[in-house]
Image (cartoon, helix red, strand yellow):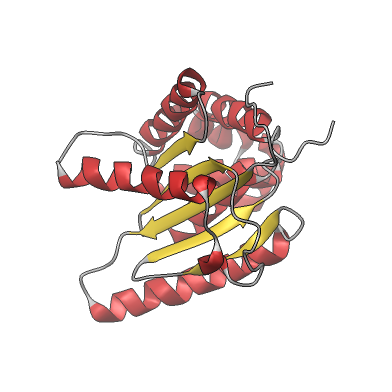
Amino acid sequence: MFFFFFSKPYISIVGEIFPSKEMEERKKQQKKLYSILEKINQEHEEDISAKFMPTIENEFQGLASKGCNLMRVLLEIKNELYPYKVRFGIGIGEVEPDFQSENAITISGLGYEKARESLKILQNRDAKKQKTFTDIHLEVVGEQNERVHLMNTIFSLLTTIESSWSNRQREIIYHMLKYQDTQSTVAKRFGVTQSTIQKTLTAGKYYAYEEAVSTLERIFSEIGDEQ
């Protein structure tokens, strides 16, 4: 087991979209965010304990009881919001039991505090102009520092790889991850040759990226695993 808890843990997620300086563009951002979160809540209903929703200013949050699809959720939000930038603070641990499933603002407790702490760490690094290559940070309740450091290192790896992608590479790679298609199937959908897809994936370091995502998925799957 990668994680150990004495009581039922939840996964608290606090996200932040980087706001545009233009008011009209901000309205577009918010409209797009609402649409994406509604889609996430519908598609991952079984995993979500408190639905994702916008909260204050440019933030949003949600609560998951299962981690098996967490990476899929985070990557889908990032991809759907692109080219707008977004970052996530994740906290794993207990939350107060009186939260409302339809209102993520009611989430409280140590696990949620860790999520806010994670987001604050990313914000502080940005404010100090620290050169950091990650837009996801994780904190876990309890003495699990080495394990958490390992996962945050993997998050950093993912963000570093993503930063090198062209728009076309991003589109094809996220398509491969979401649908788990073969190169030939993706080539037909994009109207190109299989060799073009292969070159795109190789140039975008897809296989290293996919392995890192799979590793995180296996770890997060322990949350809510009743085995």
**At 61% from the left edge and 70% from the top edge, which residue is drawn?**
38
- Above or below for 108 versus 145: below
- Above or below for 71 versus 144: below
Of all residues, the one furthest to the top in this rendering is: 146
Of all residues, the one furthest to the right in this rendering is: 227
Q: Is residue 175 visible?
A: no
- Residue closest to the eye, 28 or 201: 28
| Residue 109 image position (x, y, % from top left) | 52, 51
**At 67% from the left edge and 29% from the top edge, which residue is drawn?**
218
Of all residues, the one furthest to the left in this rendering is: 128
Residue 18, quarter of picture: bottom left
Residue 183, quarter of picture: top right
Rendered-image quadrant of the C terminus: top right
| Residue 200 image position (x, y, % from top left) | 49, 34
- Above or below for 49 versus 5: below
- Residue closest to the eye, 193 or 34: 34
Rendered-image quadrant of the N terminus: top right
| Residue 2 image position (x, y, % from top left) | 63, 22
Q: How many marks?
A: 0
Residue 17, quarter of picture: bottom left
**At 23% from the left edge and 40% from the top edge, which residue is drawn?**
125
- Residue closest to the eye, 100 or 192: 100
User: In this rendering, would 227 be left or right of 151?
Assistant: right
User: In this rendering, would 166 be left or right of 73?
Assistant: left
**At 54% from the left edge and 36% from the top edge, which residue is drawn?**
196
- Residue closest to the eye, 78 or 121: 121
- Above or below for 169 versus 154: below
Q: Is residue 98 visible?
A: yes
